[in-house]
Amino acid sequence: MKYLHLIWAELFRRKTRTVLTLLSILAAFLLFGLLNGVRESFAEAGRSAQGAERLQVGSRLSFIQALPMALNSRIAQVDGVKTVTYANWFGGAYQDPRNQIFSFAVAPNYLDVYPEIAVDPKQRAAFNSTRTGVLVGEGLMKRFGWKVGQKIPLQSTIFPNRDGSKNWDFDIVGTLSATDKKSGGWYDQMLLLQWKYFDESTPYNQGQAGWYVVRVNDASQADRVAKAIDALSANSANETKTQTEAAATAAWMKQTADIGLIVGSIMGAVFFTLLLLTGNTMAQAVRERIPELAVLKTIGFRDGSVLGLVLAESVLLVLIGGVLGLALAAVLGPIVGAGSGGMINLPPIGLSSWLLGLALMVAIGLLVGALPALRAMRLNIVDALAGR
């Protein structure tokens, strides 16, 4: 610490260059903080306390393969099953195909399996009694300016109705909200419609369920129950794969896109570029002050001390930019979530993210400072003072 003033002075010897480098480091770790939040958000999908008691039954062949409705009663008879319900993906869009909505056709008892979704009892009764009724997440209502009682047109990107078009009309009879506001980014953006209306209105479903959701009596028995459910359709044309809600969500995500690979690839490219940029800054900084380093050696600084000074400067440079970047990510995360209307729900920058970020900062600082520091350590005093 006694050399901190010296390290600080050398670090800001060329203020413009240092500030520009700090801004690059800040941008890299801001991106790291936000993208790591996206990765964690996808990884945590379905891992709620309520979700631990739920299993999802889908086709073993593909998540787009429907299952026969006959499985519903058979699954309900499996020992350990408390409740079974079913749903289909609707694939709705509002006004423009780019305005995609998380829309599902669900059974009447679907909400019984999801106690973390809050619905007014009167509105739920209206939903069950209204053939074209839909329940809409509060965030979705605000996003499009909808109101209860309003009739809305939706397009299905997958299912046409009986007249051959993909245009559907629905009546908003109630709203959805999350009892746990941390999961509001998902439930607040959902739209639920009547499965019976969906099944009767499209020629492409014909009494099939997209997947079943099972609530078990004892979460510790979930593995046994899952195997018993899969045994019902073993060696048939509709074999199932039953897994926890978290595993099912992760599998669905991976079939759509490998979020971890995408985030890792982006961050790999960003940090590789950062290594080149910061390494060039440190190499140039050391090259400019070779005579000064030689003077330090002349007045008694050992080779190891010179090595440590350059490495400390490099690490300090990355730490300043990195900490500012992560702090900015922590501030911007909630702002991004609010600005997206809940579509993007980034978790806060937690201790694990900070520790990983700090480890990366130190590692990058040591890596980019290694070669300039070694060069400084090996300086020949006579040659350096002579400009050779």
Image (cartoon, rainbow, N blue to C red):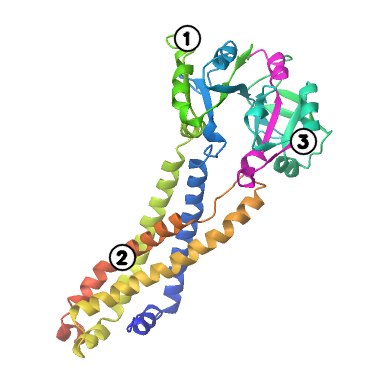
> Could you tell me how far apart the alpha carbons at marks 2 and 3 are, in whole angstroms?
59 Å
Badge 3 marks a residue whose secondary structure is loop
Report, in whole angstroms, how far the alpha carbon at label 3 lies from the one at label 1.
41 Å
The residue lying furthest to the right in this view is 149
Residue 161 visible in the shown view: no
Q: Which residue is mark 3?
A: 120
In contact (CB < 8 Å): disc 3 and disc 1 = no
159 to the left or right of 135: left
Q: Is residue 191 above or below residue 328?
A: above
Res. 368 mark: 2
Mark 3 or mark 1: whose residue is earlier in sequence: 3
Q: In the visual, does 367 lie left or right of 9?
A: left
Give the mark toward the camera: 3 or 1: 3
Could you say which quadrant of the image residue 147 lies in? top right
Query: 294 or 172, which is in the foreground?
Result: 172
Q: Position of residue 42 (x, y in %)?
A: 51, 41
Q: Amino acid at mark 1?
A: Ala
Which element is circle 1 on? loop
Residue indicated by mark 1: 237
Q: Given the image, on which type of amino acid does mark 2 rest?
A: Val
Q: Provide the residue span drawn in magenta.
A: 175-204
Along the line of sight, the residue nearer the viewer: 198 or 272: 198
Kindly identify the residue that appears in the image at 46 percent across and 70 percent down.
Answer: 20
Mark 2 vs mark 3, foreground winner is: 3
The numbered dot on residue 369 is none
Badge 3 density bin: few <14, some 14–19, many ≥20, Cα 10 Å? few
Q: Secondary structure at mark 2?
A: helix
Q: Position of residue 265 (x, y in %)?
A: 40, 46
